[in-house]
Structure formats: C-alpha cells, structure tokens
Image (cartoon, rainbow, N blue to C red):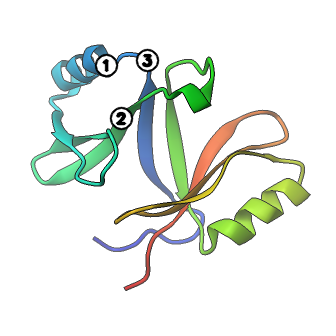
C-alpha cells in the first residue's frame, strides 16, 4: 500500500464503550470482518478480504467519560512538528505524540472550535 500524502485522510477508528455490540453492528451492517490486531494492545481491525476498512478500540479510563465516536486520522510528515503547530494555531493536544508499534506515530488534537482529529506519521522504510 502506498503511504498517503501529507494532508490526506487515511484511517477511521471507532472508540466505543461496547466493542462487542459495535463490532456485531458494523459486521452485519457493512459485511466487515472483525480481525484482532497483532500489535500488543486490545484493538480490532474491520476488514473486507485483505483490506482494512478501519479499526475499533474500547474507551479507556484515560479517555474519561468520552462518548462512543468515530475518529478520523490525517497523514502528516512530522507528528511532533504538526502537534506544536496545532497548539500555536489555537488547537489543543488531547493525547500527546505517541508511537504505535508497527503503525507509526500519532497525536490526537482538537481544533480551536473543539473538533477532534488524529494526525499520523507512518514509518519510513
């Protein structure tokens, strides 16, 4: 798969209070298969054949009383630089830059209006 370019939406992730119920719902509604992620954390990939359509994880205590929601991710060239720039532009860091093994480096931000999005930098080969 070609790495998406800077500024491109590249991933959608469901963060939910009930992964069993949500997984059953989307599998039946869209024909997705639930596939455990082999990355050392509780995470489910939604797949069709060999293609990943998105992911799902349970709301963690660190997320507080966050409602179930879909989170989109946008590719950036440098997560750390983009996180700094987001703050300079009036955004807030929700989850600081973090490495996700075999995936890349992510940060969750909110823009000045409160809308949230994830930014990700994929590893270079």
Mark 1 near mark 2, Cβ–Cβ under 8 Å?
yes
From the image, tell me which residue sits under label 2. Answer: 56
Which of 100/48 is in front? 100
At 57% from the left edge and 70% from the top edge, which residue is drawn?
6
- Tag on residue 22? 1
From the image, tell me which residue sits under label 3. Answer: 17
Residue 109: % across, % down = 70, 46
Q: Quadrant of residue 44?
A: top left
Mark 1 near mark 3, Cβ–Cβ under 8 Å?
no
What separation in Å lies between label 2 and label 3 (alpha carbons)? 10 Å
Which of 123/99 is in front? 99
Q: Secondary structure at mark 3?
A: loop
Q: Secondary structure at mark 1?
A: helix
Residue 30: % across, % down = 21, 27
Q: Earlier in the sequence, mark 2 or mark 3?
A: 3
Q: Is residue 34 left or right of residue 100?
A: left
Which of 97/46 is in front? 97
């Amino acid at each position: 798969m070609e790495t998406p370019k800077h500024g491109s939406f590249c991933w959608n992730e469901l963060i939910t209070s009930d992964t069993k119920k949500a997984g059953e719902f989307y599998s039946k509604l869209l024909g997705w298969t639930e596939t455990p992620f082999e990355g050392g954390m509780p995470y489910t990939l939604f797949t069709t054949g060999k293609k990943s359509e998105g992911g799902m994880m349970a709301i963690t205590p660190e997320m507080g009383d966050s409602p179930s929601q879909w989170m989109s991710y946008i590719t950036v060239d440098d997560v750390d630089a983009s996180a700094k720039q987001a703050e300079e532009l009036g955004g807030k860091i929700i989850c600081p830059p973090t490495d996700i093994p075999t995936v890349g480096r992510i940060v969750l931000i909110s823009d000045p209006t409160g809308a949230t999005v994830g930014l990700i930098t994929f590893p270079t080969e």
